[in-house]
Amino acid sequence: MDVLSAIALADHCSSLCITAGKELRRCFRDAKYANQDIQTLLNRLNKVKGSSDILRLWLLELKKSKIHDLEYAVPFDQKAFEDTIKQIRDLASRAAKGQSRLGIIQKLGWVAQKRTSEKLIAALEEEQRSLWEVTSGISGLEDILQENTTAIEKLDVNDGDAFSDAATLVQTSGTQPHTTSMVHPMVGVKRTWLGHILTDDHDNEYNMVRHQLSEAAFQGDWEIMFKALDIGAQEYGESWVNAIRMKPLSHSDQMSFWTPLHQAVYNNASVDVIRRLIEMGASRTLRSRYTEFSQLDMSPLELAHDLQMFHLYDILSPTIRWHIPSRTLAVLEKKFDDIIRQDLGDYVGERKLYLPALELCTEFEPEPIWFPVKLPGRQSAGYLYRVEGRELVVRVFNLPNEGDARTYRVAEDGIFDIGQALPGSP
């Protein structure tokens, strides 16, 4: 099989998983009597999609090399996979039709479908292993791939869950942070506002590990998720605990803005996982922009409410440490936006920058948050900001011109250029 055909196969598998996943999610929302079985099937389907996506990433790297044909037969039965997806969609359809029945009849009807569900899960496990066998074979071409990238770590496949055991994480040479990455200008800043949400704005290595973070959260692979968060801090000097899934500019209108905490709720993570995310700085006030539930813009707590995860209500309830009136907060946020837009002009709209939501500041102690701005050829540009009382103090670095530095105190009655920097800043 040639590389382009293999890429098309990976795309096709991923697309089929997305289609079936949407239909299963509708069942998960409505068919409460079958939630556990549907969730298990959905999780396995998501893992197959993740394996397809990882295979595609490898193939895209291979495409950059001089290799055009794979040197072995691809051990993946596309027809069998398509049949499995069809059976999953049929199962979802039958479950949806059962909604009009009385509760006890619904439950009895699902008992008859449970064995089908279990067979489909086993089939997906086998197909995932086949996908990973293809990926493992391609990773054997490591010497050639290294001519184009050092971003992918060679994988080992164990007998257990293929994606969990062999998920890729970015490896970089040496232990120093990437010189091409944006590192905040203040050592010790724990929180980062990740405003660049387009893959076009980052290099391949950064995109690869951010993709792994999003995939791990999406699939409920918490070990890999926390490893990716560690890489973000150690290699890039950024906190990714509130990172959303990035997409290219051409797909920027398809972002859901789910954070790892949203995914943890949806995947029914343990309280320990959720507590660890919160301790790392996960926001309980950030909202999505799209869901398939009761509202488009949902906080993790609202998502838990829709999913009837009552045991998570307390831990997901935001702890507000700075009680700033919502009207005041909105004014400060608008004025901060004005500062950014004045510095960056059309770049804000052209790059779809996700500008800081100040409600997040109310959840934490008064420590600075770093918003890196990634401009071509510019290092350490951005905004260091924090709430003080009912005002916002903003320190600007290397904007609008390289070498510029200034500090603003933002209040309801205006924006004031002041001489003092934030304590501890350079």
Image (spheres, rainbow, N blue to C red):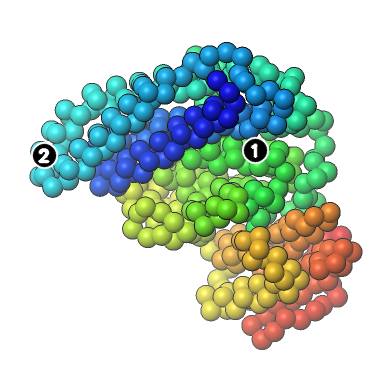
Q: Is residue 323 left or right of residue 40?
A: right
> What residue is rendered at 67% in x and 80% in y?
411
Kind of residue at disc 1: Met
* Residue 25 in view here: yes
Circle 2: element type = helix
Q: Which residue is mark 2?
A: 104
At which x and y percent is residue 323? 55, 71
Whether the residues at callouts 2 and 1 have beta carbons within 8 Å, the answer is no
Q: Nearer the viewer, residue 229 or 376?
A: 376
Kind of residue at disc 2: Ile
Vertical comparison of 140 with 27: above or below: above
User: Which residue, as the protein is rendered here, is positioned at the far bottom?
Assistant: 413
Q: Nearer the viewer, residue 81 or 399?
A: 81
Circle 1: element type = helix
At which x and y percent is residue 13? 45, 32
Image quadrant where one finds the C terminus: bottom right
Q: Which mark is residue 208?
A: 1
Q: Is residue 264 left or right of residue 22?
A: right
Image quadrant where one finds the N terminus: top right
* Disc 1 packing (10 Å; few <14; some 14–19; many ≥20): some
Q: Nearer the viewer, mark 2 or mark 1?
A: 1
* Residue 282 in view here: no
Mark sitting earlier along the chain (2/1)? 2
> What residue is rendered at 75% in x and 30% in y?
148
